Image (cartoon, rainbow, N blue to C red):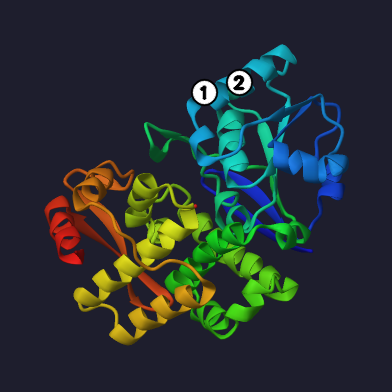
Amino acid sequence: MKTLSIHSAIGNSEILVGETLVNVGTYLPKNRKIAIITDKNIRSLYGSQFPQADVIIEIPEGENNKVLHTLENIFEQLVAAEFDRTSFILAIGGGIVCDVSGFAAATFMRGIDFGFVSTTLLSQVDASVGGKNGVNFKGFKNMIGTFCLPRFVICELNMLTSLPTSELLSGMAEVVKHGAIADPDLFEYIEQNPDKVLAYDAEALERFVYDSVVIKSTIVNKDAKEGGARRFFNFGHTFGHAIEKNTKMPHGYAVSIGMVIASKMSAARGLLSQHDVDRIIAVLQALGLPTECEIEPIALFEALKRDKKRDGDGIHFVLLDKIGNAVVEKLSLNELEQIIHDLR
Ligand code: GLY
């Protein structure tokens, strides 16, 4: 097991890469009420390894259930089980379970302690690390939420081998993102080993999780609330979220296309070489991720206008000046409208 720490403006968190669900009891507070929040699939696969809890709350699966109504159900069950401010929430699941549970814990009675057992590649390399939580609202991603760190995050590597390929690839899009914005060696390793990804090679998966957590914890330690470097993690996500909203494709797939658009924009602005754009497209294609899609420009622009990263009449847009180095430029909505037009 490898341990990394976040000590940031929004609190502290221990990330335990390679720790297992059966050991989670060691990290839970004693003599306090415990609620486990999970989903049906995870409970059916791993319920026999769950620790003792006062209540187990199952939330429905799927991005369309990452909504306020799901939180209401959680709060109802916590109240019914007489939870108080000393109680603890343990989320066991992927990105949706962790995002919703983190938000529930951050807001129930103005905030109670919580921890995660993160079960998917996407949540281990991104969603469960760094304290962002929340739900979608009116179809817009993560519109309502808080920054609040779990006490611990267990990245259960054993569970990755049973992920469906689409889940694995969705997580890999975020790993490619981390290479592209901050780690050229990681990027090169993925370029050289797409076969290991598709074979669920244990050593490769451990590297993807560990390297990603190193990048996330280093940046979150400096900029927890996304005023500066944390914005880099939004590479591919401005168009990605707009594509996800309009096509309902998995998050990582939409981010993959978003990264291609952002890379082409970086080249068009004279920042990134065409060679690096081609490398980014090639690595995504080698993994089997999509690099383009058909979408109405008007719908894309409408979704962009409501992006969380909007600031007045512009959006802080993440570009690359080489593989391994991100830069942020504020682009006006007019410029983005023109870019969408030119993409056609
Ligand atoms: N998922 C992007 C971030 O944690 O900042």
Which mark identifies residue 73? 2
Where does the image place residue 217, in percent across and percent down from the top left?
A: 57, 59
Where does the image place residue 159, in percent across and percent down from the top left?
A: 75, 56
> How packed is label 2: few (under 14 Cα within 10 Å), some, or many (20 or more)?
few
286 or 328: nearer the viewer = 286
Left or right of 292 in this view: 53: right
Specify the amino acid type for callout 2: Asn
Left or right of 90 in this view: 191: left
Where does the image place residue 337, in percent across and percent down from the top left?
A: 15, 54
> How packed is label 1: few (under 14 Cα within 10 Å), some, or many (20 or more)?
few
The residue sitting at 81% across, 45% down in the picture is: 46
Count numbered badges in the picture. 2
263 or 233: nearer the viewer = 263
- Say which residue label 1 marks: 69
Left or right of 123 in this view: 90: right
Quarter of the image where one finds residue 256: bottom left
